[in-house]
Amino acid sequence: MTQTAETGARHADNPLLADTPTIPFDRIRAEHVAPAIRAALARAEAELDAIVRLEGPRTYENTVMALEELGERLGRVIRPAAHLVSVMSSPELREAYESVLPEFSAFQARIPLNPDLWHAFKAYVETDDARRLTGVHARHLDKVVRAFVRAGADLPDDAKARVEALRVELSTLGTEFANHVLDSTNAFELVITDQAELEGLPESARAQARAAAAAKEIDGWRFTLQLPSYQPFLQYSARRELRERIYQAYANRAVEGEHDNRPLVRRILELRRELAGLLGFRDYADYALEESMAGTGARAVEFEEDLAARTRPFWQAENEELEAYARTGLGLDRLQPWDVAYVAERVRQDRFELDAEALRPYFPMDGVLAGLFELSRRLFGVTVCERESHEVWHPEVRCYDVLDEAGERLGGFYTDWFPREPKRGGAWMNGLVVGGPRPDGWEPHLALMVANLSPPEGGRPALLTHREVQTVFHEFGHLLHHVLSRVEVPALGGTRVPADWVELPSQIMENWTWERPALELFARHWETGEPIPDALYGRMLAARTFMGASFQMRQLSFGTLDLDLHVGWDPAGGGDPVLRAQEVMARFQPRPDFARDHFITSFTHIFSGGYAAAYYSYLWSEVLDADAFTRFQREGLFDRDTGRAFVDCVLSRGDEEDPAVLFRRFMGRDPDPGALLRRNLGVDEEVR
Ligand SMILES: [Zn+2]
């Protein structure tokens, strides 16, 4: 609306700016990215200006929603471009995107610090129109106002300047921290030239190491500290001294010379504490968790402590079993940190004889998807149907529509399942358009699911491992959360919810992949159509809780350490945070000497990722999903009424209400960790 005729014409054929209901992904090229994003930024800037300079009475629509909508319009240009960078990354595309990213970030950062805009919002809050708001609109206004305050909008100028300086320095330090970890990870290699030293390693690990050596034009087998190389080595290598070498290198990354992260650990913690103090919080955890379910650092600490106390006895039993097996079964005198994964794998093979590959023939990709869609139809009343489209970024991409029980189209999604060179690793669901009810009718949702699953091979369809099946179900849970959203405000719709709530819809779906009646729906041998044999299913179930307490204690150690540094450690009191980290970790190790390494200097989740003071969210969400699933177990795995209640209370609600209220509405009570303990540890604790 503020474009001149000239720029309007220049942008008319830019597919990123196309005003169409679908996104013409097939036509987007690197050269479209920067002009489109710059045009979108210019438009957003003008719209922001119009909000500030508005004359006449302020209303929710012309002030709060206007800001919301300009952000959404901008997102519709940014998100498809960002998505292409992660799935079709060419140097040109990446460069184009990175050339405009700083402008976008700066625009985002300036919004809450714009004093005129803040003034306009404060003026609106005082109006009768604002006081009359109810429900999701009142919550929305409240959140927007808090976002201004949390950014420092209310502080005197010198404090505001300090907050800005702190954020800039923290962001630089976070990047530096991650670079040090990356550089010291890449600085190590273990090259084996004597085949005998590969003892114990499976064929896949050997082939990978052979290729890694060839890529560097060296002879032999090259192992690195990248997880796909490091993990199988520790798990399978029968050579103890080599395990020790690679373990020590991994556990002591970023503690030396130019990659030393120890000073950064202290500096980042100090600055975060200062930032929280300036914004009126006791510590960084209280600041970071204000908008989460936990709400405060103290509540998160209490959660960790309670779960750790309940996990500890089972974990001790697992440790004793490992130690006994190491001594009598493997002749290892004293278990060391570099033995744990190896011994656990030997016990697992001994006890369950479970070859993860044996399940693959029962999980052909198309069968898994058909079963998953059928499950969603029975439970949640949604119909998923494939739709032909040529507007995709790769020929393997498929498009689907999602319809509700009345046949109304709720939205659509793309899938992109298999690895490609220029595609980021991992699996994820992303929202492209957060739709829902709007004043002028239903706006369709648009989303995508991406993964890197085992591809079709040699004329066979793609056959998945059980772990991969869980990944598909997990991402589809996020997708349902997105496309079933009926929230009127996009900012609070779909998966735009606190981090300790967002994994409930995804993780709960994984539960069905373990249940016999659900497996009957989709786990059929790709050639014979036979279901999984009872004996194989039995072994799969039995292995489910193996080392479950150890896994849980590991997660608890990370969560506790994270909170201890952001709540307990006070820079004013002195003390070395690196030593303190070792002390905290020692409480979660079979022996204190297991914690003598420097895990903290490579803990990127909390020093350069988005999980500072929030690592606990992983287990928190697991408590929620394990607990909520018990209602389905009780009332029926395909029970439509229970499914409807889950849609009404959770899947359609986004962040419309306090998640604790939403959970209580579904379960009739607060979350109970008993179900998680039963599922992960195989414990029979009574549900309160
Ligand atoms: Zn997830």
Image (cartoon, grey):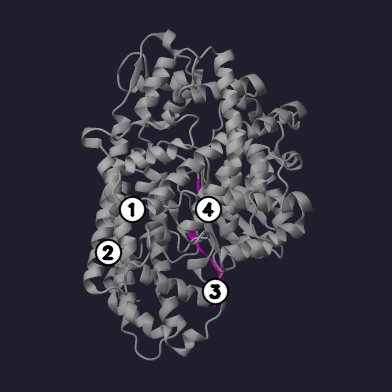
- Give the number of the disc on residue 136: 3
**For marks 2 and 4 on the same chain, the one whose residue lies earlier in the sequence:** 2
Q: Which residue type carries mark 4?
A: Glu
| Cα separation between marks 4 and 1 | 19 Å
Q: Nearer the viewer, residue 623 or 230?
A: 623
**Secondary element at tag 3:** helix
In front: mark 2 or mark 3? 2
Please name the predominant secondary structure of the magenta segment in the image: strand
| Cα separation between marks 2 and 1 | 19 Å
| Residue 22 shown left or right of residue 524 in the figure | left
Which residue matches tag 1? Answer: 570
- Give the number of the disc on residue 302: 4
Task: Specify start and end residues of the magenta stretch as a single range.
Answer: 428-443
Does the residue tagged 4 have its C-beta within 8 Å of any atom of ligand 1?
no
Q: Residues within 10 Å of mark 2 (few under 14, many from 20)?
A: many
How far across and down, in percent of the image, does residue 79 sit? 41, 57
How far across and down, in percent of the image, does residue 446 sit? 52, 59
**Secondary element at tag 1:** loop
